[in-house]
Amino acid sequence: MPDPSSAAAKPGFPKEEWVPGRASLDTLNSEVPGNSILEDPSRLHARLQRDLFNVRRDHTVLEARFEAEVQSSSSRIQSLDSALARALSDLDRVHGSAGWRVLVQARRLTAFIPPTLRKLIRRSARLLWWIVTLKLRRRLSELRQARSTPPGIPCISAPLAGQIADYDPHILSEAVLRLERFAAFDPAAYGAMHRDSTSTGLSPSAHAFCYGAQEGRALFTHEAIARALGLYSTAREGEAAQPGFRSPLTAGSRGHTLGLYRHSAGEEAVTIFAKNLAVKLRTAGADIQLLDETSDLNARPEVTLVIAPHEFFYGEGGRIWRRQDVVTGSFMLNTEPLQSPGFARAVPFLMAARGVIDVTPQLTEMLADAGVPALSLSSGLSYDASPLTQEDRDHPLFRVLPKAVKKQPDPAAMWTDRDVAVMFSGDHTPYRERVLAGYAPRLAEYACFLHCRRLPGSPSGSPFGARRQKTHLSRLYTHVTGHSKILLDIHADEFGSAEWHGLAERAAWTGSVLVTEGRLPHGLLRAGEHYFKETPRYTPDLIDWLLKSADGQETARRVCMNNQALLTARPDPFFAVDPLMGMLWGNRI
């Protein structure tokens, strides 16, 4: 019979694994002479007692150290809590002072000053301060030295820059530095998600910019996204100052044409957004051209704005537009939320752009803090309010509508006389499926329009999914909303849609009432005044209250009146054209 010890060493047998306690037992057996355990058990008992004493002594020492650390940490926490309380008290006194209230009004007034004039005022104040403090000569000397010294930002060599290898190394390095300062980007988390990136010799931010985004990798963890959104969601609803309407276009700047670029095969909502934006800007006196990826690359207008860069640069024919002069000389209008794959793919173009316009105030602040010139555009321009076409009426979704709902909506009709109680539309996600399944028993009591689309994936790998699958649905959704009492909004995922105010504007224009889950705060809309907000657990109860009780119907009527007053206000509160025009024309090359 073969020896088991020799068989364990042969190929095909598992190697001997380390077992806790085996090493100490082997050492003990090697130190004790043969058969001593059986011959002298009292000697072994004494040795074990000594070892047990040493273990207990070490345990006592470690326990004392742990208690000391806990006490020290508790004292530090108490001191930090006291410091925080004092700081909050000081902050409350500052905010309650007359000087702070005066400064708040002064800061609101600065929103009316053009960016060029604000920059001139800041420079003049700095120059005056240097003269008063006798620091003018030293400061001018430091500025001359800084201009003559090469940038201290480490450059990325061009061969390591992936698909953007023709970019200037200094421009690449500045864009990578912006990504590194971006609040939602965690270099350590990116390296942990993509361990193969460490072998390239690039930093996590450089790899994410040059390779990760263009390869479709995830750049941000859910934890980092939640932390960043929470950090930048300190503003309360309804407190954002709305700038007045003052067209910044002078006689000289009216000759400059703005080119609005979007991909011709992109989502219909983006095309509608571009057309509505063009109408708004033309009304303000701007010369607008609607262009796409088939336009002449070398005949671009002086001011260019790329809408939905995640579609434009990755769609068919968009690769040739990824040149340095195009990206760094253009403004980008991002339409994707922070947690979406589309935003991650657009990161290289957002970080290297001349400026970024976003529909989410929180994301705009993140970009601005990272060093990207950014502006928030609070607008619901992505829905189509034009009348239905014959092609729309031939759509299967329209043919199944009740006869009364097929008619043109009457804006003057009473809210209680509408034929559809609850209307929901959106792409299918696991979260929405779970929520709608929970709502089903309660919504079955009403006449509802619930359309949750299952879009097929794009076989070509296009970043904007089914592309033209959404054709004609935007007008149909607006038509049905005009017949609905409640427009229901359900999150697509755990973060939700940051640009939900587009739905709020659609509900306001059509006379319905928006019922939504908890959203990021908005500077114009208030819950209970312009829309209703409730958690998914109690949303069916809110719907019952609005539809069945007299008090709920009166509250819904008051919300509709508030929305109508908001829509008829001048200037248009949903679209502040002045800051947008000032950014585009005031920062052109």
Image (tube, rainbow, N blue to C red):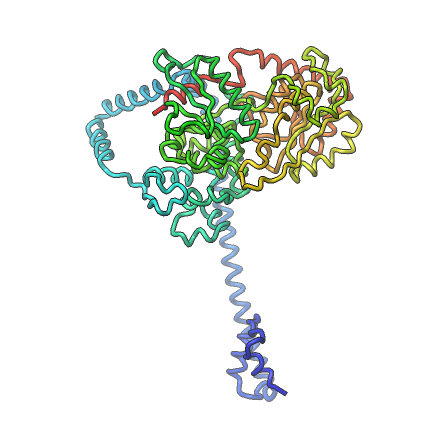
Q: Position of residue 481 (x, y in %)?
A: 67, 21
Report whether residue 326 is seen: yes
Query: Based on the displayed image, in which of its 4 quarters is residue 426 positioned?
Result: top right
Give the vertical position of 447 relative to 314 (above or below).
above
- Residue 27 or residue 113, whichever sits in front: 113
Query: Based on the displayed image, in which of its 4 quarters is residue 562 positioned?
Result: top right
Query: Based on the displayed image, in which of its 4 quarters is residue 146 positioned?
Result: top left
Q: Position of residue 584 (x, y in %)?
A: 40, 22
- Residue 136 or residue 159, whichever sits in front: 159
Q: Quick check: 452 left or right of 316?
A: right
Report whether residue 173 is seen: no
Give the vertical position of 562 relative to 426 (above or below).
above
Q: Position of residue 302 (x, y in %)?
A: 37, 23
Q: Position of residue 326 (x, y in %)?
A: 38, 31
- Residue 185 or residue 359, whichever sits in front: 359
Which quadrant is the N terminus positioned in?
Answer: bottom right
Name which residue lies at 69% across and 13% down: 410
